[in-house]
Image: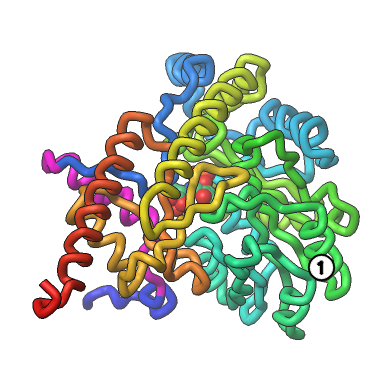
Amino acid sequence: MKPRPAPIATSLGRSPTVALLDEAQRQKARGVQVFNLSGGEPDFPTPAHIVRPAVEALEAGFTHYTPSRGLPELRDAIAAKLLAENGITADPETDIVVTPSAKHGMFIALAGVIAPGDEVLVPSPAWVSYAPMITLLGGRPVDVPLDPSDQFTITEEQLTAAVTPRTRAILVNSPNNPTGRMLSPAEADAVTRVARAYDLSILADEIYEHIRYGGRSHVSLAAWPGGTGRTITVNGFSKSHAMTGWRLGYVAGPAAVMREVVKVQEHTVGCAASFVQRGALAAFTDESQVAVREMVASYDGRRRYVVDALNKMSGIACADPEGAFYVLPDISRLGFGSARECGAWLLEHAGVLVTPGSAFGPTVGQHVRLSFAASPETLATAIERLGTALAGRELTQAAAAVSPAAR
Ligand code: PMP
Ligand code: GLU
């Protein structure tokens, strides 16, 4: 008998961001040159001082299971970081779980708080995997569409309007993928007031925490009045430390919830990879702070270059991101039928891979997302090719618009 796929699995689409990253790798393997600005993949190698202890751990035979919550010394380092940088008090014994990726961290955190039929408010645009995770757990993702013309600001009114008796949690990502927006104090107030009024959990995805520009401060909802005691913070190493392939993250929250969350980890993966955790210990050193600062300074330069170059292109309006490493330009004046159509055209005519905004929510169906974590060379070539292709398209359209009679 053939295995019959489960309806809940077949109901999901592929992750658009991962599918595009896969596609770029396939094209590269076939020798086709594609300038990939789709996925959020830092071009930097993982800093050597993080790689070294992981290799040494492997060579020393540190290749067995660790406690399911993660290495005690790594949890200690995470607790110290959360206190010093975020003002979050987390007991390393009871409040922290080291996870194989922030993605899995978010999944088990959601598993720890929602029951089938529960609703989770997800202000959008939002990263592509939140809604499928909630759906897989039998919950219902409730899109709270934010207004691009209001800089995607989260308001108390909008959140309140989406609350029903089944609402259980609010999921917030700051700095945001894909908008680059960072939670302001007023928005943090709005989220925590609604959470308190309806006794909701908050899931705070802070994976881009270190990647921010213009001296902006990062708000951690777990340390915000009204957020403490009800917030589960999800974070990781992929973006800040250029460690996407290591698959390492962590979750911190109140002991009573984390007791349940760790069970999901135990029954799914057991623990994060042992030698990977040894390497990650070096991510909390002064040397790492310097490495992260240097990478962020480089992203900052790329940000200014990309925003400036895109805004010079006719028909494109690009807001300046406050954090993360994406831009989400409005392409509505280019006159494509959809962002997907625009993406396909850019791939065909410029060889540049971007992510259609529609992957992230209904209010950005006329936006595309470009990652500027690509190497400066890739970025410069891609931007030049986009400019040339779009200028050529404009000329063709202008010529077509001149009626034969007028010529
Ligand atoms: N959250 C957001 C907003 C992301 O963009 C990503 C990117 N992969 C993740 C979580 C997951 O990160 P990872 O699984 O690589 O730790
Ligand atoms: N988070 C990145 C992105 O949004 C990487 C791919 C993924 O895991 O979704 O492109």
- Residue at (58% x, 41% y) in the render: 249
Q: Is residue 368 left or right of residue 176?
A: left
Q: Is residue 138 visible?
A: yes
Tell me, yes or no, whether the highlighted magenta stretch contains residue 19: yes
- The chief SS type of the magenta part is helix
Q: Which residue is mark 1?
A: 195
Residue sticking out furthest to the right: 225
The C terminus: image quadrant: bottom left
Nearer to us in this view, 256 or 63: 256
The N terminus: image quadrant: bottom left
The picture places residue 335, in percent across and down from the top left corner, at 33, 70
- Number of numbered discs present? 1
Instruction: Work out whether 323 lies above or below 226.
Output: above
Nearer to us in this view, 242 or 174: 174
Residue sticking out furthest to the bottom: 165
Nearer to us in this view, 174 or 352: 352
Q: Is residue 121 left or right of residue 363?
A: right
The part of the image, by quadrant, that contains residue 374 is top left
Residue span colored magenta:
12-32
Q: Residues within 10 Å of mark 1 (few under 14, many from 20)?
A: many
- Residue at (16% x, 66% y) in the render: 399
- Residue at (57% x, 58% y) in the render: 107
Q: Is residue 61 visible?
A: no
Mark 1 Cβ and ligand 1 under 8 Å apart: no
Q: Secondary structure at mark 1?
A: helix
- Residue at (48% x, 67% y) in the render: 364
Looking at the picture, which amino acid does disc 1 mark? Ala
Tell me, yes or no, whether the highlighted magenta stretch contains residue 200: no
The picture places residue 285, in percent across and down from the top left corner, at 66, 18
The picture places residue 91, in percent across and down from the top left corner, at 82, 39
